[in-house]
Image: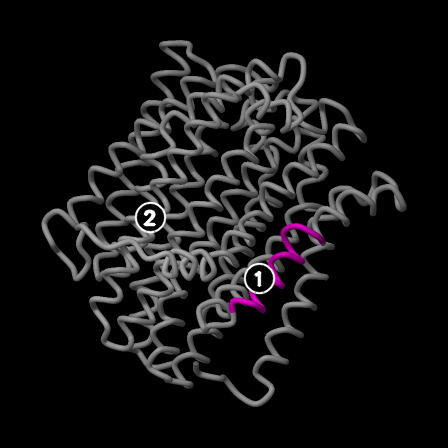
Amino acid sequence: MADSRKKIIFKNVAPAILANACVFLFSVVDGIFVGQGAGMDALGAVNLALPFVLLVQALNAMASIGGVTITAIRFGRGDKEGAQNAFMHAVTINFIVGCLVTLIGCGLTAPVCKLLGATGNYLELAKDYVFWWALFAIANSVSLNLQSFCRNDGNPGLVAVTNVVITVLNIFLDWLFVFPLGMGVAGAAIATGISQVVGLCVILTHFIFKKGELRIRKYKPQGKLYRKIVLRGLPEAIAQFSTPVTTFCMNQTLMATYGDIGINAFSIISYLSSFTMSVFFGASEGMQPLFGQAYGAKQDDDLKGYYRAGQIISVIGSAICVAIYVIFPLPLCKLFGADDVTAEFTAIHMWEYCWGFVVGSMNTMISAYLYSTKRSGQAIALNIVRSLVMNSLVITFIPMIFGKLVVWHTFGIFEVLVLVVALIIKNSSERKGIVYK
């Protein structure tokens, strides 16, 4: 690979991974402070609420990635006005998503938490977290959108700075609200919300001071472009649905198999899971504009080179995370405030779940490659299989057949099955070479 291509990849992928890691780190930091300050039941309650948070992040990704994909292709063609138009349409979609999440999360808090499986003591704790997290959803949605476009508008450094500021502030506020002020899970959610508001203010400076090509300005809404953005972003949204659906299904299966200790153990593993997934979602988001630009310019060599590099980055990054979790399970469990029994139980099952991350990273990159090269239909089919079908079926029914010993392995099993489908789809679509449309 040419040195120039390596520099381009690093410039795009490193800030994207950092940005995603920081976003998911909010949940991890919340979990650490909640576990240490409010106990394992509170941590379990936040884990039950986590599918709601991850579902919202998936919806945010739909407009952000869809808009960025179209913008990258149009920039590759030299169509700056078309790229600007796609940007404004995508920002609007994210704003609407934030408004809807606030209305649902704050107005229907109890039904949402019950739907997530929260009962008894878990219910009140989960309600506190969902209500206060949803209150700041607009800032969260718009901030994530603008970060994606800022990165692809030639200013990935500001995105990195934004996320460092958000993360440091979130850690401080988590400590302040959970420990000195004793606000429990509500304090953790409020800390995340305030941090997102500050992050939005920081990232807005790129557009206010006109540091790139994109501008926040009036535009004429086009229904066709809205649909196009949703279609382009739908594969990524469906891919990210995999995390909340998997978490929900695992919660139900573990509750039935192990009871409270299963939920509390998985609360730790799911926090680590969300952080690990941020690495390969970040890698795919960082590579996505490079795929789009190379495709728009019809550069076969660059496109193939970017795909290989993306897979290498994803596999190495996820493998490093898995190694850390497998080597240091007990210290990680203690970090979340786990008692000795829960820590020992979690450490035993840690590797059984985490090995699937390496396979999952490959599936995520293949999906990004497909939808960035105008193969949205194939990408949607792949991600429906992965996020809505294979994971729910495997996690729910395989333990019924083989018993509790296979429960923790179900994540890796369904990712392997999905990888087989992904490679078949990719190779069949390129049997006669890459088709440019």
Q: Which residue is mark 1?
A: 380
Query: Amino acid under label 2?
Result: Asn
Indicate the quadrant where residue 170 lies: top left
- Name the N-terminal-most of marks 1 and 2: 2
Indicate the quadrant where residue 137 lies: top left
Check the image and name the residue furthest to the bottom: 432
The verdict on residue 424 being magenta is no
Q: CA distance from mark 1 to mark 2?
A: 21 Å
Position of residue 136 measured from the top left corner of the image (x, y, whole percent)? 36, 28
Q: Going 72% across and 22% down the picture, which residue do you hit?
A: 260
Q: Going 60% across and 48% down the picture, which residue do you hit?
A: 242
Position of residue 420 measured from the top left corner of the image (x, y, whole percent)? 70, 68
Magenta range = 376-389
Check the image and name the residue furthest to the right: 401
Position of residue 306 measured from the top left corner of the image (x, y, whole percent)? 42, 74
> Most prominent secondary structure in the magenta stretch?
helix
Q: Image height check: is 269 above or below 136?
A: below
Q: Which residue is mark 2?
A: 145
Q: Nearer the viewer's eye, disc 1 or disc 2?
A: 1
Q: Secondary structure at mark 2?
A: helix
Query: Amino acid under label 1?
Result: Ile
Position of residue 376 measured from the top left corner of the image (x, y, whole percent)? 52, 67
Q: How many marks?
A: 2
Q: Going 46% across and 52% down the picture, which residue do you hit?
A: 279
Asked whether 426 or 62 is in front, the reply is 62
Check the image and name the residue furthest to the left: 209
